[in-house]
Image: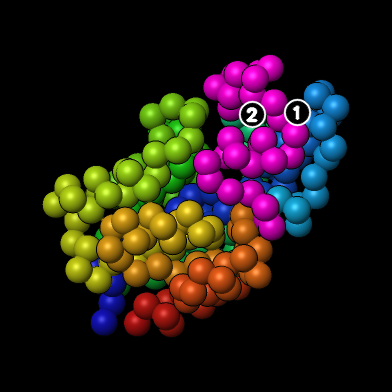
């Protein structure tokens, strides 16, 4: 039975931006005398809320305001995001879902106006009937927005699937009482995602077979 709805995460699922996130993080680390992190370290340790991750690598929010750190990070990230390509095969999967008549929406921790702009830039905005992003640069409301989305009555969640790349995406799926398929090519390592217990793929081209 085909899904009644596909809910897509953006960063790390649709957009291959992990290396840019790490590069920006290390740029800010160097300015503060904080050791740089590797891409593998990021995938093994990044968590929500992001504030906890920053604290774990050495940021002191008694000396610096977290909101200002978040603003700086997003500003620098935005300058480089155009370097990030789409994940392999994501356009083909979006087109397949469209041809099957499956409604598709985006649920992201990215800021709304920036998210809309990047979807347009990447040439994939047309695939989504609804886009839900954060209202500010302070990340933290994705699970709450997931609950509100499911309760809105706008979409048929009777056989909905969320496609994401993190354990936080799995939490969002649980909040919507929908299925979840996780992709290991994004912001969390395969080892971490295996512990979640959701169906796991290493290539988005495998998604249609799981959804048929």
Let me know if residue 68 is in the magenta part.
yes
Disc 1 is placed on an element classified as helix
Q: At 35% from the left edge and 82% from the top edge, which residue is drawn?
A: 212
Q: At 45% from the left edge and 38% from the top edge, which residue is drawn?
A: 140
* The N terminus: image quadrant: bottom left
- What residue occupies the far left of the structure in this picture? 153
Image coordinates of residue 173 in percent, x first then y, are 36, 60
Residue placed most toward the observer, 140 or 114: 140
Marks 2 and 1 close (CB-CB < 8 Å): yes
Q: Is residue 68 visible?
A: yes
- Vertical placement of 169 versus 200: above or below? above
Q: Earlier in the sequence, mark 2 or mark 1?
A: 1
Image coordinates of residue 36 in percent, x first then y, are 83, 40
Image coordinates of residue 123 in percent, x first then y, are 47, 47
Q: In the image, 97: left or right of 201?
A: left
In space, the residues marked 2 and 1 are separated at their CA atoms by 8 Å
Q: At 71% from the left edge and 50% from the top edge, which residue is drawn?
A: 42
Q: In the image, 177: left or right of 33?
A: left
Q: At 34% from the left edge and 69% from the top edge, which residue is drawn?
A: 179
- Residue, disc 1: 28
Q: Residues within 10 Å of mark 2 (few under 14, many from 20)?
A: some
Let me know if residue 150 is in the magenta part.
no
Splitting the image into 4 quarters, where does residue 20 fall? top right
Magenta range: 43-70
Q: In the image, 102: left or right of 39?
A: left
- What residue occupies the far front of the structure in this picture? 62
Image coordinates of residue 50 in percent, x first then y, are 57, 39
- Residue, disc 2: 73
Q: In the image, 196: left or right of 210?
A: right
**In the image, which disc is placed on residue 114?**
none
């Amino acid at each position: 039975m085909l899904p009644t709805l596909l809910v897509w995460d953006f960063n790390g699922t649709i957009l291959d931006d992990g290396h840019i996130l790490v590069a920006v993080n290390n740029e800010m680390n160097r300015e503060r005398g904080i050791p740089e992190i590797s891409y593998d370290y990021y995938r093994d340790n990044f968590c929500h809320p992001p504030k906890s991750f920053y604290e774990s690598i050495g940021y002191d929010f008694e000396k610096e305001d977290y909101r200002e750190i978040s603003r700086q990070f997003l500003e620098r990230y935005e300058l480089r995001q155009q370097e990030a390509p789409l994940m392999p095969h994501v356009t083909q999967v979006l087109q397949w879902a469209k041809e099957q008549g499956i409604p598709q929406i985006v649920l992201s921790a990215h800021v709304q106006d920036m998210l809309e702009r990047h979807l347009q830039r990447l040439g994939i905005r047309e695939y989504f009937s609804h886009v839900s992003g954060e209202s500010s640069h302070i990340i933290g409301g994705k699970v709450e927005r997931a609950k509100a989305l499911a309760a809105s009555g706008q979409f048929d969640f009777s056989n909905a699937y969320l496609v994401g790349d993190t354990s936080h995406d799995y939490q969002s799926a649980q909040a919507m009482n929908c299925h979840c398929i996780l992709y290991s090519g994004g912001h969390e390592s395969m080892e971490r995602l295996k512990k979640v217990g959701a169906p796991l793929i290493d290539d988005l081209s495998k998604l249609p077979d799981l959804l048929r």
